[in-house]
Image: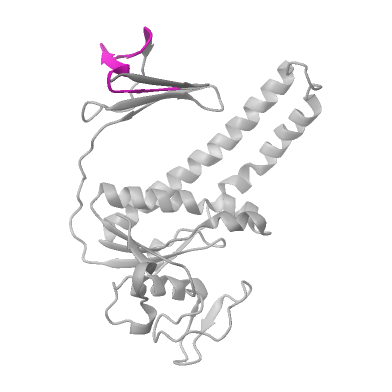
Amino acid sequence: MARIRLRAPSAEGTRRGFRLKGGRLHLAGGLALTVVWSRALPAAPSSVRVYRDSLGHWYASFVDPAEAQVLPEAGQAIGIDWGVKQTATTTSEAHDLSHPEHGKRTSGRLARYQRMMARRKSKRGQAASRGYRRARRQAAKVYKKAARQRQDTARKWAKRVTADFDQIAVEDFRPKFLAKTTMARKAADAAIASAKRELINMARKHGRTVWLVRPAYTTMDCGQCGARAKRALPLSERMYTCDACGVVSPRDRNSARVMLVRAGLDPAGADRVRPEGPQVRQAA
């Protein structure tokens, strides 16, 4: 059954709602589009979405089946803890993801164009002026560039992690609450959710396994003996000291090891660190 759904400024077609002929995309209703292909389609697509971004550029996104490109076995496991000072801290220092600060580098230009928009904003009920539209487009270009840089950094890091490790234990972190804190801007620039999504997608593509670990008490548990601290560590305290075994470790590095042990990927770790039930779930 053909179906086409229109949403300004986008269109979605499934099954017989579109077809590809002569390198052109034909949508229901007699609309034919010339597509500049970024790469060849591996198989016949099952659906398409045509949409316009904030810069006025049009894109066609196809959904088609893809085979996993399984990488050779590495026989290694890694634990990953998300943070704001450093986007990802792992049990392998060589695979840490530092804060790229792409948004911070472009914040000056973005603020400049936003001030121009505020000065040129028309009164209510009036059409936007040419100067306002020009400033809005420049602001969108700056924002889009930072977003693409974050995505590119996350993909390259995810590719490096999946190439070197078969099993990946990741903190199942939901950063929404950071929007209400003083670290909101830095957390948004770190793009933790984007990095996590790219890691899961890359692991699925290359046949790796990702374990999502609940973040409860990961900053209080010891990654060596499993003892739990009697108090929660404030954010200003960056070193973890275990009262039971006396081990001293960077706070985020200890949390990364807790992720690894909780997922059952470190048999030599403490048994008390690994929880029971749905606190650990497989993602890919």
**Horizontal placement of 172 versus 184: left or right?**
left
In the rendered image, residue 25, in percent from the top left (x then y), is placed at 33, 15
User: Residue drawn at (45%, 76%), measured in percent from left and top?
Assistant: 254
User: Residue drawn at (44%, 48%), measured in percent from left and top?
Assistant: 153
| Magenta stretch: includes residue 17 | yes
The quadrant of the rendering that contains the N terminus is: top left
In the rendered image, residue 225, in percent from the top left (x then y), is placed at 39, 87
Q: Is residue 88 above or below residue 22?
A: below
**Horizontal placement of 19 versus 151: left or right?**
left
| Magenta stretch: includes residue 109 | no
Q: How is the rendered protein coloured?
A: one colour
In the rendered image, residue 196, in percent from the top left (x then y), is placed at 42, 53
Main SS of the magenta part reads: strand
Quarter of the image where one finds residue 231: bottom right
Q: Give the residue at the far top of this rendering.
A: 30
Any part of residue 270 in sight: no
In the rendered image, residue 209, in percent from the top left (x then y), is placed at 27, 58
User: Residue drawn at (49%, 45%), measured in percent from left and top?
Assistant: 150
Per the rendered image, the range of residues in magenta is: 11-31
Quarter of the image where one finds residue 152: top left
